[in-house]
Image (cartoon, helix red, strand yellow):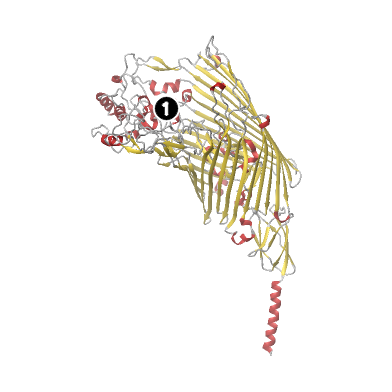
């Protein structure tokens, strides 16, 4: 009985206890951020369930839970917090302060007229912070960005590595082939258009690249092919911070081919002179004896008393000169200093900086120098709780000086590469020979440029309410340049030490000045609307206008009186002058609407109504819309169990349309009479007459190039933000490019105007993968990959004949048409057997052993290009494509107890290059264009007694001045131009703060950094893969080489 009673008691108590445990509690509270501001739309969920709610506009929430339940508080951009429900009763108070996720904060990016967290982006935007370009020994920001941003393509200009040369760049490949059109992206520095190549890299805080129409459309017709937004550093509240950095750089040319020795060169020369002999045996022996030290004099005088160089075969010199080695320094130096001061109070902050860069040139006998000075200042002041003002000013001066002869269409590089090695640098009297080009460089005059950039920006921010603000700014830029070039009469000395003129028999001086004024007011307003249950809106509307005015004046005058003061005033001969004024303007009304629901569903709508002065009134204005949307699956409730693994899983897509008004012709639709002062032929006196000509016809259909694009993307953040991945696929179509004029009868009596009649499509993808983690507490490391690819295809182009010499429908940009090589005939019998089947006479005659055998692809028994059309291209076929494909960058970095290491690899995964010109073919370029590097000695030789030995398995065919039979574009010599370059490598050490602070230094780092250190490629060793297709004749390397740089640097903060 007692046991039964106790059993009943325990059963009743157990039921009561279970009921108590199961009793629900009303949990209430407020969620705020670290600034104690309420946070609407925060997700509050009972962990392990789908039961939850969201905070209202005041950050308040209420939900039913049980004692012991764990509530999870989460919001995009903030660290998720878990809180346990404790206590009993019917209600429980639980308030939470969410802290911003510092990893996600680093993903806040600058977008058009504002900023956004990357987790809320729906357009295609890539961001680079200052750390990615710190300690890089580069002269320009553009150089530092190569390989860091997928889809941003950097190219070397025709000036190569010259000190004042700049890099070219585009986003997602060529955007247009329209006549006079440009596909360069818009570059904005703190909201104002600027020159990225002239900016001090140390002033940069962040760079955002807007790639698709959804991201760039807010800038309208100025940004049809993307935008690069650069934000510079600004002051922060707190104590004064002084930062100083400096580096010393040692440069050397990346590519410096070695000339063949003069004996091998002369032997090669004889082989190329089919049917003749340039160097007889005794002359060859003389050259050999000089190399062996048996003869001391290398140059001989002729009957005119001058030193013989190449006319009299008996008196030809016998030296052994490597012209590139003689002219290029092995090492040339540069240095840089940077100083900044920043600080401020809660109301006012300031940032001041100064930078000086000095660069020395490559040449031993051609003094060349570049100096760049940069001064920057930025002040921000909070006048009251509603009004803030800012002022930003930047001044840049760049001075460049070099010999005038270096500017003669790169002919200097062409000359020293092709000049005969038997000619000495100096004659027997110790004077520099005429052929050495040293007199031209040292005495032929100097060219100097002085260029100034002055940027001024005044901004105002006014906060009407907590959710409504206004931003207004006025931007003003002045660019002025003065250029001077004097071409002095140049002398060399003959065998009697008497001077004689070798260049500029009539001396002259040229001077020019130009000034450009750019005015740009912007005003826009933002309104934020945050509703209950996580519905968030952001509205923005504004107006922007631009006005650019430029003017230029130039003069040229002959017969300089005093060569030590070569100016227009000290010249007395014939003179010419020129000058002019230009201007253009744009205006645009723009707006944007952003919507998100609890960070899950994202929508953005942009619109801009743009006008430009370049078109007539009825075609001047156009509307450009864009739409983008995203879905962050990781913010869905069903994703709660996986959020610790994948915190962001966002799908996004966009579509937009923009117009291109960026043409070289500022007045394409206006009837303009041509006029030029001092441009006619000499008639009477010392001045040329002014000339004028009738205007051409104007196309009534000339108008905007329309650029339509769509983009699909995926963003993933996983494994507690250690892994980040971004992927984009895009299609961009440029419609109505300016193509060729219609063919009309000559009886029209005027040139037919060009019109909008061509279309092109670009397709491609971009990938970014980053991993950051640590091992233990002291070892931190990171791995980063960028990969991008795009192809451009012609959709429409007037080409009725289907000629391969121009664009045609279906053609991919960069296509290479050529012949298919069967091989090099090793014997005359092999060649005769081939010729019995295939007639190669259209490519040349006198075919023999050592010549190329071509494949008869169309089976007609002859090798030819047919009519060079799509329907009849003979034996030509598409053998490659010179467009760089699969551009990539790989970053590996690590840090351990003050030591840091980084290596950055950059390259191209696929590219073909069709070689041409004497630089590659050697003596096949003709007698006076002969170039013989050591690589050229691997040519066909079937004589066992040849001085250079037998070579039946050669790379090059037999040399021959008189025929281009072997120099056709063909598969055998199509180059694989893919490469991987160690773009940057750094090793640094940061002194522990407990040590540095004893001497008043808060941060001290020393480092060594290398740029362009080594290249892995199958490309011919004669070429730099970053310099293909530029320089003299477009041969790829007859220009100023790029540099390999080592730098020793110091960075300290007080």
Q: Residue 694: give x, y in percent of width and height.
A: 59, 19
Q: Within 10 angstroms of label 1, few (less than 14), some, or many (20 or more) residues? A: many
216 vs 240, nearest the viewer: 216
Check the image and report above or below for 598 versus 555. below
* Residue 251 at least partly seen: yes
Q: Which of 585 and 775 is in front in this view?
A: 585
Residue closest to the far right: 464
Coordinates of residue 818 in the picture (x, y in percent)? 41, 36
The correct choice, above or below, for 19 with respect to 217 in the image is below
Query: Which image quarter: residue 480?
Result: top right
Per the image, label 1 sits on a secondary structure element best described as: helix
Q: Among all residues in the image, which is located at the extreme left?
A: 945
Return the residue nearer the eye: 842 or 349. 842
| Screen quadrant of the N terminus | bottom right
Give me the residue at 70% from left, 39% from top: 542
Q: Is residue 924 left or right of residue 146?
A: left
On the image, the x and y values in percent for residue 289 come to: 26, 27
Q: Name the residue under label 1.
A: 414
């Amino acid at each position: 009985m007692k046991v039964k009673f106790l059993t009943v008691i325990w059963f009743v108590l157990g039921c009561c206890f279970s009921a108590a445990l199961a009793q629900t509690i009303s949990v209430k509270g407020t969620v705020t951020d670290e600034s104690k501001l309420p946070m609407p739309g925060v997700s509050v969920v009972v962990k392990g369930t789908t039961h939850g709610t969201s905070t209202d506009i005041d950050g308040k929430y209420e939900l039913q839970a049980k004692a012991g339940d764990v509530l999870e508080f989460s919001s995009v951009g903030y660290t998720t917090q878990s809180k346990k429900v404790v206590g009993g009763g019917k209600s429980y108070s639980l308030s939470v302060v969410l802290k911003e996720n510092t990893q996600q904060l680093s993903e806040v990016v600058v977008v058009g007229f504002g900023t956004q967290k990357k987790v809320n982006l729906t357009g295609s935007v890539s961001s680079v912070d200052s750390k990615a370009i710190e300690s890089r020994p580069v002269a320009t920001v553009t150089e530092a960005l190569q390989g860091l941003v997928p889809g941003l393509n950097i190219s070397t200009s025709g000036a190569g590595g010259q000190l004042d040369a700049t890099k070219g760049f585009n986003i997602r490949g060529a955007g247009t082939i329209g006549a006079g059109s440009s596909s360069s992206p818009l570059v904005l520095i703190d909201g104002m258009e600027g020159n990225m190549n002239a900016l001090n890299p140390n002033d940069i805080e962040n760079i955002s690249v807007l790639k698709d129409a959804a991201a760039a459309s807010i800038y309208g017709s100025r940004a049809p092919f993307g935008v690069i937004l650069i934000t510079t550093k600004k002051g922060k509240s707190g104590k004064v911070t002084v930062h100083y950095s400096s580096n010393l750089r040692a440069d050397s040319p990346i590519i410096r081919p070695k000339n063949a020795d003069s004996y091998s060169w002369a032997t090669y020369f004889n082989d190329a002179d089919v049917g003749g002999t340039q160097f007889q045996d005794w002359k060859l022996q003389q050259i050999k004896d000089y190399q062996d030290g048996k003869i001391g004099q290398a140059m001989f005088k002729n009957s005119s008393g001058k030193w013989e160089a190449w006319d009299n075969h008996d008196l030809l010199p016998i030296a052994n000169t490597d012209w590139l080695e003689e002219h290029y320094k092995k090492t040339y130096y540069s240095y840089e200093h940077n100083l900044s001061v920043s600080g401020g109070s809660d109301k006012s902050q300031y940032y001041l900086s100064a930078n000086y860069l000095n660069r020395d040139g490559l040449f031993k006998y051609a003094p060349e120098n570049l100096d760049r000075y940069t001064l920057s200042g930025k002040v921000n002041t909070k006048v009251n709780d509603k009004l803030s003002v800012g002022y930003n000013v930047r001044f840049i001066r760049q001075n460049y000086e070099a010999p005038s002869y270096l500017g003669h269409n790169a002919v200097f590089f062409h000359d020293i590469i092709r000049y005969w090695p038997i000619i000495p640098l100096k004659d027997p009297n110790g004077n520099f020979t005429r052929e050495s080009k040293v007199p031209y460089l040292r005495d032929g005059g100097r060219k100097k440029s002085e260029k100034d950039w002055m940027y001024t920006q005044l901004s105002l921010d006014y906060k009407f309410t907590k959710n409504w603000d206004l931003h207004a700014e006025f931007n003003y830029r002045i660019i002025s340049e003065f250029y001077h070039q004097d071409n002095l009469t140049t002398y060399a000395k003959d065998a009697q030490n008497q001077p004689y003129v070798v260049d500029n028999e009539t001396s002259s001086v040229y001077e020019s000045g130009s000034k450009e004024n750019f005015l740009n007011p912007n005003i826009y307003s933002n309104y934020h609307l945050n509703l209950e249950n996580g519905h968030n809106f952001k509205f923005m509307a504004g107006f922007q206008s631009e006005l650019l005015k430029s003017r230029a004046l130039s003069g040229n005058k002959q017969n300089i009186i005093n060569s030590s003061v070569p100016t227009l005033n000290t010249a007395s001969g014939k003179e010419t002058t020129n000058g002019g004024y230009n201007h253009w303007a744009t205006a645009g009304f723009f707006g944007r609407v952003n919507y998100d629901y609890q960070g899950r569903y994202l929508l953005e709508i942009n619109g801009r109504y743009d006008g430009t002065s370049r078109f007539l009134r009825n075609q001047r204005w156009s509307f450009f819309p864009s739409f983008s949307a995203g879905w962050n699956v990781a913010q869905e409730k069903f994703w709660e169990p996986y959020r610790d693994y994948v915190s962001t899983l966002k799908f996004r897509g966009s579509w937009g349309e923009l117009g291109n008004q960026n043409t070289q012709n500022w007045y394409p639709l206006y009837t303009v009479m041509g006029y030029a002062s001092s441009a006619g032929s000499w008639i009477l006196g010392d001045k040329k007459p002014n000339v004028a000509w009738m205007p051409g016809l104007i196309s009534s259909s000339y108008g905007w190039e329309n650029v339509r694009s769509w983009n699909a993307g995926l963003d993933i953040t996983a494994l507690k933000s250690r892994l980040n991945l971004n992927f984009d696929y895009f299609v961009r179509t440029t419609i109505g490019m300016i193509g060729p004029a219609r063919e009309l009868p000559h009886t029209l009596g005027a040139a037919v105007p060009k019109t909008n009649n061509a279309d092109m499509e670009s397709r491609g993808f971009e990938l970014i993968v980053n991993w950051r983690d640590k091992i233990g507490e002291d070892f931190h490391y990171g791995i980063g990959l960028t990969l991008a690819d795009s192809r451009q295809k012609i959709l429409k182009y007037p080409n009725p004949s289907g000629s391969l010499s121009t664009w045609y429908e279906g053609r991919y940009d960069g296509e290479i048409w050529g012949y298919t090589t069967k091989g090099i005939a090793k014997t005359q019998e092999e060649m005769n057997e081939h010729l019995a089947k295939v007639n190669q006479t259209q490519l040349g005659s006198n075919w023999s052993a050592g010549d190329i055998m071509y494949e008869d692809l169309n089976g007609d028994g002859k090798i030819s290009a047919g009519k060079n059309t799509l329907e009849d291209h003979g034996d030509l076929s598409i053998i490659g494509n010179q467009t760089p494909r699969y551009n990539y960058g790989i970053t590996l970095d690590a840090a351990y107890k003050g030591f840091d290491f980084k290596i950055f690899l950059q390259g191209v995964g696929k590219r073909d290059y069709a070689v041409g010109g004497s630089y590659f073919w050697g003596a096949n370029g003709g007698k006076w264009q002969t170039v013989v590097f050591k690589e050229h000695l691997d040519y066909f030789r079937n004589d066992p007694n040849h001085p250079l030995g037998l070579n039946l398995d050669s790379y090059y065919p037999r040399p021959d001045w008189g025929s281009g039979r072997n120099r056709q574009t063909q598969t055998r010599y199509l180059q694989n131009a893919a490469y991987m370059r160690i773009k940057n490598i750094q090793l640094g050490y940061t002194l522990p703060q407990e040590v540095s602070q004893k001497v008043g230094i808060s941060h001290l780092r020393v480092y060594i950094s290398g740029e362009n250190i080594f290249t892995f490629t199958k490309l011919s060793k004669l070429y730099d893969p970053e310099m293909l297709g530029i320089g003299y004749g477009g041969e790829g390397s007859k220009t100023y080489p790029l540099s390999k740089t080592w730098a020793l640097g110091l960075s300290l903060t007080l």
